[in-house]
Amino acid sequence: MLLFYHFGRYLLFLKKMFSKPETFSIYVSRTFTEMVEIGIRSLPIVAIIALFSGAVSTVQTAYQLVSGLVSKTIIGSIVSDTVILEFAPTITCLVLAGKVGSSIASEIGTMKVSEQIDALEVMGINSAGYLVLPKIIAGVIMVPLLIILAMFLGIYGGMMAGSMAEILPVEQFLEGARSTFKGFNVAFSLIKATTFGFIITSVSSFQGYYTEGGALEVGRSSTNAVVYSAIMILFTDYLIAQILL
Amino acid sequence: MIEVKNINKSFGEKQVLQDISATFLPGKVNVIIGASGSGKSVLMKCMVGLVEPDNGQILYDQQDFLSADYTSKKDIRKQIGMLFQGSALFDSLTAEENVAFPLKMFSNMSKQEQKERVDFCLHRVNLDHAHKLFPSEISGGMKKRVGIARAIALNPKYLFCDEPNSGLDPVTSRVIDNLIEEITDEFNITTIMNSHDMKTLFDIGDHVTFIYKGKLAFEGNIEDFRKDTSEEISEFLSASYFQR
């Protein structure tokens, strides 16, 4: 029952956020600020994760392919498909749920407990819309862009690991990657990324917005934001795969 | 003038406000007093729309705030300035950006006009040197003064002050009290202040609303309050430091 209560509250929160918006110009500048916060500031961590996850998958795929009957180009094929379909969108978004989600929840939670949200409400500003909507728009735009970057870097990492560990040359890796490449896989991955971007920003904002108490509760909201975002990401990942694949 | 009529508010089983009816006089410092937990903060939050009462009316110049549509409510809110207990300044903005915030959101002022208004407001609260400082870089008293400057930026008709002296030393408390009194007179604002500081009440208060255990125990002017012999008021006055 508690699950339904929280889900209903979350839907009402989204409704509140989209109702009675402030003037458009206010959202534009705030959205750009959030795009920098969510997108640009996440570049280093996304790059590191993508490079290493690609590299590790090349090494491990090679380790499992001990048969001489299988062409080594299959490594490029497996790694690139795995990176595009799963590693880039899901693993990266799970990490973003930790980085961006906790940051959003603690920012909004602190504003809540220090009456800054009340100050907005007294002024007649739709606080949920003013604070959260730009974050969601920024998340929905920037997360797919980060995932595109993660795809490139993941494949590059896998390719370089294969070359440096003398598993397979760059040409063979690329040949394998090209042989099974499907444009739909990229589209599928971007649909997931957009959905995950929405989940991370909205769930974390929800957790922060309903924080009651003090510093301890802000920390708790931050933790909840990461946990619930991660669970929602994994659940939606399965759901989208079932529907689209 | 603000009138509250038959306000009731419960949180779960606990009834916090019981049938409160009171009038807040225009151009005066109206002080809501009562012990901690008596319901005065909840009453103020009901009046500014942060908490929805279970029933009753809140009239701003005869216009019912609770039953007003979104646009009318927003129009009333534009006439309200509020100083919060913890100042509630936006952490990511400097003092001048905090004061400029309501101007950016609600006024049609040019950037130059906004700047002039911000300079005026910060000058009025004696903070000419704090324009570029962030809330984390200023003292509690300065935060309250920036909070007052932000509250008066849009020339409000009503100024709500939630425990403006809490957490301040006696000297700074008097500075804030005097500032609120001066601003009330200077701009003919209806000020509603929430406090349990009896010195504040007797120094700057014009009209008293005394809440005792969620009920209205007294409403009237300072002299009548001082002379009142009811048990609740006597107990409160005798317990206050000012009367010792």
Image (cartoon, coloured by chain):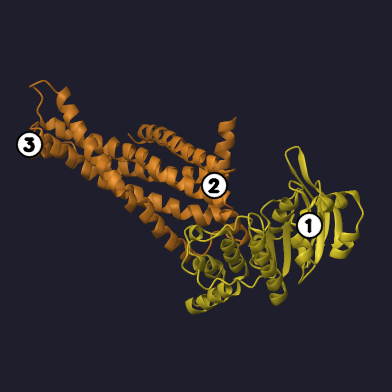
Mark 1 residue element: helix
Q: Are marks 1 and 3 in contact (CB under 8 Å)?
A: no
Residue A34 falls left or right of residue A11: left
Q: Kindly identify the amino acid type of the residue bearing the numbered disc 3.
A: Pro
Total marks placed: 3
Task: Chain letter for mark 1, please.
Answer: B
Residue placed under numbered mark 1 in the picture: B242
Who comes first in sequence, dot 2 or dot 3?
Answer: 3
Residue placed under numbered mark 2 in the picture: A209
The quarter in which the N terminus of chain A is drawn is top right
**Label placed on residue A169:** 3
Chain B colour as displayed: yellow
Q: Kindly identify the amino acid type of the residue bearing the numbered disc 1.
A: Phe
Q: Do we see residue B212 in this rendering?
A: yes
Q: Quadrant of residue A163?
A: top left
Which residue is nearer to you in this view: A202 or B21? B21
Q: Can you say whether B107 is above or below A44 in the image?
A: below
Residue A66 falls left or right of residue A16: left
Q: Residue furthest right?
A: B229
